[in-house]
Image (cartoon, rainbow, N blue to C red):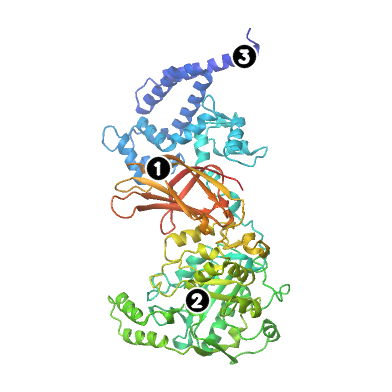
Amino acid sequence: MTCPNQRRAVLCEQSKIELVQRKHEMYKVKSPYQMFIGTICGQLIAEHSESTLTFLNLYFLHTWFLSVIQEDFRAGKISVEKTAKLLEKLNIRCDGNHVKYVFKENDIHRNGKITIEEFRGIYRNFAYREEVVEIFKTYSSNRKMSEQNLIKFLKQEQYVEMSDTIASEIIQKYEPIEEVKRQHQMTIEGFIRYMNSDDCLLFKKDCTHVYHDMTRPLNDYFISSSHNTYLISGQLIGPSDLWGYASALVKGCRCLEIDCWDGSQNEPVVYHGHTLTSKILFKTVIQVINKYAFMASDYPVVLSLENHCSPQQQEIMANNLQSILGDTLLSDILEKFPDELPSPEALKFKILVKNKKIGTIKETIERLGRDKHGQILECEEEEDDEEDDGIEDYPKEHINSLIVKESKEKEVEEKPSIIKHFISYSKKKKIRKVKIALELSDLVIYTKAEKFKGFHHAQLYQKFNENNSIGELLARKLSKQKAREFISHTNNFITRIYPKASRTDSSNYIPQEFWNVGCQMVALNFQTPGLPMDLQNGKFLDNGGCGYLLKPEILRNPKLNFSPNELKEYNPTILSIRLISGFQLPPTNRNDPLVLIEIHGIPDDQTKQQTHVVRKNAFSPRWNETFTFTVHAPEMALVRFVAENQATIGSNEFLGQYTLPLLCMDKGYRTIPLFSKTGDNLDPASLFVYVWYHE
């Protein structure tokens, strides 16, 4: 026997069906839009045998869809341009080339115009991705996902930390159909919008803001660092440009390099000395730094000065720094840090000068407020100082040929004298006397540049505020032969690594090998795209992109006696990645995509695996392959996804990449955005994965 409530529910559903039937009768007039409405309503009535509830859900879905697009079809068919705009209106991100391709496939009459029904097919191509629809079907019934089933999906698949309201909030945020939203349910339309949202990106939301402990001493952090920041091309010829500083700071770089030389009219200039690179004024560099210093991050900026100026122009530099930077320039010791390095938190919105310094911090404090104009101090140093980028050790014949080669298209009258000067510079004696203006020297507080003379010497004599710069070749040798001593050194002193002088094309080394031994400032040529900068950008995505990353405990705790070259009994992390599909990959002539998954970390963790090739499909390739990695030092590891197009001859064609720290990966079904070689977002190009690992 049927209870009264059940009878009322059946009568209610029957009345809704009758309403749809009446609407179906209304649309027997013959406009294209009305004909389509009639067709859809007829289909719904014919198909409602599944269940009345399923029928009503379909009705809600189709009426919502038509309500969004109907105005665009009042005049009849639409063009490919209008199609792209209408997809955007429906919150479907799409690439213009793929829209044209799918449009052509659905343009039955090949006249450059499509009907409303043909547009529906295009929309389903872009929105209803098979792999996402399959997930929705698993957790839904009657073509809707209830709040309870959404909670089940979030717990079982997405590993979301649940709250009482999170499922309800997702429905309210992403479900476009008001009738369904009021029922606390989600249609496929809401689900695909949720799965394509920032909430389902691979990169953890918690990592998009500053969450590391920022109260540790500076030497406990990796610091995003640039080499020869003023250069935007090669090292021997080409422009020096203010944009180098602006762009580096916008990317979160916190250590900038400034090569300073005497200029005309008593104005110091910045350029790569003894080369054909152009010159820019030191004061304009400082003005740009002052403008952009804290746009991307509140944490301190270090200006690494390569100072080749006379004492007179050093005083001009000191005056520029003080007058332009004002209170942001750290020119006095912090009261709470008289004999130890302060923290990034304590140095917020401060700019530090890294340069040679005469005397101690205590002597600097005693001179505060005194007139130092004209006071010059002198010290001795070895000519092959690491701070000079090793340029004097570069082979003379090769220097000559490179400058001639790179400048052959320019008629440069002063070229012979420049080459002569360059070569004579490389013949200087091993010991030289350096004159430093006291005004500039006293602006150096916690970042005094000190020549590296070995780990033992540093342990005995180096002061807490003295920083070393080590060339890539020596640093690589030390990291392989004396890794534990290197880590002990970086535990105590800020260490900067810079590229070897033979990298005249501004190429980069792989930074991971120096992060593995705790080097804080691993300086790269930011203007040169490729794997090294992918690793740099990926690593410093973490901690809100603020440019400072707290080093893992294995690099800060001497008791752990860690060496990246010798594995102890660590508990490895098992990382599982199911590479499900790609979507709207950059189209090429062949469109034969594959994906590489690379692990970058300590030597034993370095590995890569790749998918099979999907033939002739850059729009929605499906791989559905699972890869497993054993990672011994997950806190050091970066994961890089690279989409390529298989080439018949030579190297594969790069399509896009994404790099991030392993521990910043969210678990579950996740979308991976892809970026170009130059770091531009290729949205909507993406990969779809399922990730699991234990932390």
Residue 689 position, x and y percent, is: 49, 43
Which mark is drawn over residue 85? 1
Is residue 627 shown left or right of residue 336? Answer: left
Q: What residue is shown with label 3?
A: 6
Identified by mark 1, the residue type is: Lys
Which mark is drawn over residue 258? 2
Please report the residue visible at 39 percent of the width from the left and 88 percent of the height from the top. 424
Is residue 324 shown left or right of residue 584? Answer: right
* Mark 3–mark 1 CB contact (< 8 Å): no
Residue 215 position, x and y percent, is: 68, 64
Gap between marks 3 and 1 measured at Cα: 45 Å
Residue 142 position, x and y percent, is: 53, 24
Q: Quadrant of residue 486?
A: bottom right
* In front: label 2 or label 1: 2
Which mark is drawn over residue 73? none
Identified by mark 3, the residue type is: Gln
Please report the residue visible at 54 percent of the width from the left and 82 percent of the height from the top. 317
Front residue of 311 and 425: 425
